[in-house]
Image: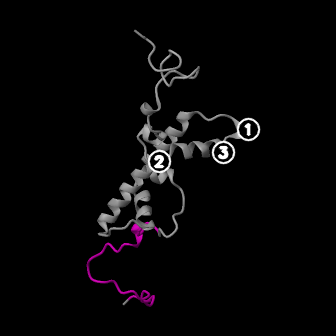
């Protein structure tokens, strides 16, 4: 009875001399992006590349730094888009414009403190100073100059 199974070498695997006698090509997994591993939509690899470009004197950038930065950027983007979508709903339109982004950012106290940029095409926040608001609802006051009276008493 012959116990040798599979041609050359008795180490198993692919056969032949040497080499790795591990798993075959059929059991190899498909490559998975770092974004999908982290459960993010933002590109972890691209952000890692940009971080490495911005580091002084060729210092190293850890792998988790890009994941953490991507998660923060994704969260902030989702927050701004949600608030801008709410502004669109209030104004009964279906498309987010720079105006809606400005209203969303300036309407949120924390985002307003963080984002100090001018948004092109955003306009300004509607505001009327309280001293300009007419509080009286009675009869209108004449707008002319006050009448001068003579110094004599009658």
Image vertical order of residue 42 relative to residue 104, above or below? above
What residue sits right under mark 2 in the picture?
42
Colour treatment of the image = one colour
Asked if labels 1 and 3 touch by Cβ distance under 8 angstroms, the answer is no
Q: Quick one: SS at disc 3?
A: helix
Q: Secondary structure at mark 1?
A: helix
Residue 11, image x, y percentages: 50, 16
Question: In the picture, which quadrant includes the N terminus?
Answer: top left
Q: Residues within 10 Å of mark 1 (few under 14, many from 20)?
A: few
Residue 66 belongs to magenta span: no
User: Which is closer to the viewer, label 2 or label 1?
Assistant: 2
To which residue does mark 1 refer?
A: 57
What label sits on residue 53 in the rendered view?
3
- Residue at horizontal 36 percent and vertical 90 percent from the top: 154
Spatial separation of the CA atoms under disc 3 and disc 2: 18 Å
Looking at the rendering, the stretch of residues picked out in magenta corresponds to: 124-153
Along the line of sight, the residue nearer the viewer: 58 or 144: 58
In 3D space, how far apart are the residues under numbered discs 3 and 1 (Cα atoms)? Answer: 10 Å
């Amino acid at each position: 009875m012959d116990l040798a199974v599979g041609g050359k070498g008795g180490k198993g695997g692919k056969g032949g001399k040497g080499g790795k006698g591990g798993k075959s090509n059929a059991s190899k997994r498909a490559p998975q992006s770092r974004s999908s591993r982290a459960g993010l939509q933002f590109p972890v690899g691209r952000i890692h590349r940009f971080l490495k470009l911005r580091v002084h004197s060729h210092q190293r950038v850890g792998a988790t730094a890009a994941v953490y930065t991507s998660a923060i950027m994704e969260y902030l983007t989702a927050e701004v888009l949600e608030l801008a979508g709410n502004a669109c709903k209030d104004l009964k339109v279906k498309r987010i414009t720079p105006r809606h982004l400005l209203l969303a950012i300036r309407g949120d106290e924390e985002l307003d403190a963080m984002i100090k940029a001018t948004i092109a095409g955003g306009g300004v926040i509607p505001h009327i100073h309280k001293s300009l608001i007419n509080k009286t609802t009675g009869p209108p006051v004449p707008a002319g100059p006050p009448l001068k009276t003579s110094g004599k008493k009658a």
